[in-house]
């Protein structure tokens, strides 16, 4: 079934997007913050208790993997009303992360060799073979297992006398999204909302750590904000947005390490279009690579460098052009990622709070 990512019909996509938007805008975003805060605090306390090293007692800790577990728990809590439990078990429950990682590798090829999509589609129509290669909610592993998690949450929710709309599942049911469509959209949200955020946080943290100058400046800004008591614990998004160097680091991290590297497929309208002076016939599939767009000249003569200061320019016109180009990593217009506000909230909080624990 076509979903918010794969639907090509403009009118159908617009209708679907209008229903899904309820889970990503306005009051929904505001309601997400305390949920994210609760899971983030739990993660911080667990790291402090179980993995913090003392003098003469060094404990190995894979923060990248742990951040993946945290983002999975956050997105499952926000979408389905219950965290998957990866942080608590310190494990990749149901091989969720491994499945997403393998799926991303496949998408790399399918986004370039579009003929493979058509071949795969026809293979699924062959009796017996189709059911064998197509994932289903009864599968014990892979995408099918994720589908099963969504199906079980949906069945449990529909069995209640009153509809709980405190998460995306309830909101979409209330908006009248067909139940079969609901499964497809929530699977997309779970996959996209966990891996991309985790990748962005890990990449940005690594870039900060590997650059002593950036590390010192950001550390000083965070320490000063804490000392002057102008931030909460954990930091609230509105507070984080008032810290200029933190914002510069977040924007630069996303620019330098876009979380998606496959081509973003688009269809040229029937009347055709011109791209860089070249006539492109209507109906042509085109794609842009996020990594390529982020080394544009608008970012200066050193786009390959991780330099947050480029975002602190006083040139408003240049800053506007930079922001417009940088935001292409989330898509544009009617295909812009609905989860962008949620992702930015998580990024700000996680990067700020990866510091010495509070007493």
Image: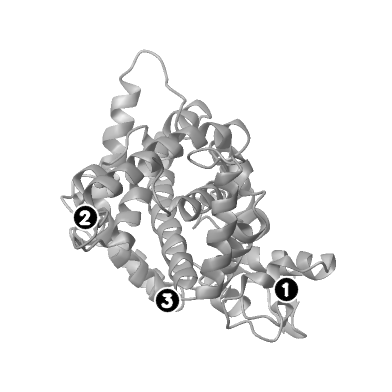
In terms of sequence position, does the residue under pointer 1 or pointer 3 come before the other? 3
Front residue of 343 and 169: 343
| Kind of element beneath mark 2 | helix
Q: Residue at the spot x=61%, y=68% of the render?
A: 267
- Circle 3 Cα neighbour tier, 10 Å, few/some/many (<14 / 14–19 / ≥20): few
Q: Position of residue 107 (x, y in %)?
A: 39, 69
Residue 43, picture quadrant: top left
In terms of sequence position, does the residue under pointer 2 or pointer 1 come before the other? 2
Mark 2 to mark 1 CA distance (whole Å): 44 Å
Mark 2, mark 1: which one is toward the viewer? 2
| Kind of element beneath mark 1 | loop
Q: In this view, does 177 lie above or below 250?
A: above
Q: Residue furthest top?
A: 161
Q: Residue 95 carries which label?
A: 2
Q: Residue at the spot x=29%, y=29% of the render?
A: 155
In terms of sequence position, does the residue under pointer 3 or pointer 2 come before the other? 2
**Left or right: where does residue 292 sit relative to residue 61?**
right
Would you name the residue on which mark 3 appears? 115
Would you name the residue on which mark 1 appears? 272
Mark 1 to mark 3 CA distance (whole Å): 22 Å
Quarter of the image with the C terminus in it = top left
Residue 114, picture quadrant: bottom left
Mark 3 to mark 2 CA distance (whole Å): 29 Å
């Amino acid at each position: 079934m076509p979903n918010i990512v794969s639907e090509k019909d403009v009118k159908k996509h617009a209708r679907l997007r209008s229903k899904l938007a309820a889970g990503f805008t306005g009051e929904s975003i505001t309601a997400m913050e305390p949920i994210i805060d609760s899971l983030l605090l739990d993660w911080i306390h667990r790291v402090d208790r179980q993995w913090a090293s003392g003098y003469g007692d060094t404990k190995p800790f894979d923060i990248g993997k742990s951040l993946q577990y945290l983002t999975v728990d956050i997105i499952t809590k926000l979408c389905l009303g219950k965290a998957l439990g990866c942080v608590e078990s310190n494990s990749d429950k149901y091989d969720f992360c491994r499945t997403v990682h393998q799926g991303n590798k496949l998408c790399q090829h399918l986004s370039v060799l579009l003929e493979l999509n058509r071949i795969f589609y026809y293979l699924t129509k062959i009796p017996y073979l189709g059911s064998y290669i197509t994932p289903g909610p009864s599968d014990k592993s892979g995408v099918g297992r994720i589908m099963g998690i969504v199906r079980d949450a949906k069945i449990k929710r529909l069995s209640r006398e009153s509809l709980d709309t405190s998460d995306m599942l309830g909101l979409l049911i209330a908006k009248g999204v067909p139940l079969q469509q609901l499964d497809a959209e929530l699977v997309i949200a779970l996959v996209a909302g966990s891996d991309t955020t985790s990748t962005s946080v890990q990449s940005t943290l690594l870039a900060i750590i590997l650059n002593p100058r950036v590390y010192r400046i950001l550390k000083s800004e965070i320490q000063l904000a804490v000392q002057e008591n102008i931030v909460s614990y954990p930091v609230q998004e509105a507070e984080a947005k008032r810290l200029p160097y933190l914002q510069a680091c977040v924007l630069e991290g996303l620019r330098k390490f876009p979380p998606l590297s496959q081509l973003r497929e688009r269809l040229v309208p029937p009347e055709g279009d011109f791209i860089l002076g070249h006539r492109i016939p209507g109906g042509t599939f085109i794609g842009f690579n996020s990594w390529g767009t982020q080394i544009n000249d608008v970012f200066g003569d050193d786009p390959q460098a991780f330099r947050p200061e480029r975002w602190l320019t006083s040139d408003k016109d240049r800053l506007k052009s930079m922001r417009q180009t940088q935001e292409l990593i989330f898509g544009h217009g009617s295909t812009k990622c609905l989860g962008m506000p949620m992702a930015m909230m998580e990024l700000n909080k996680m990067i700020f709070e990866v510091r010495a624990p509070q007493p």
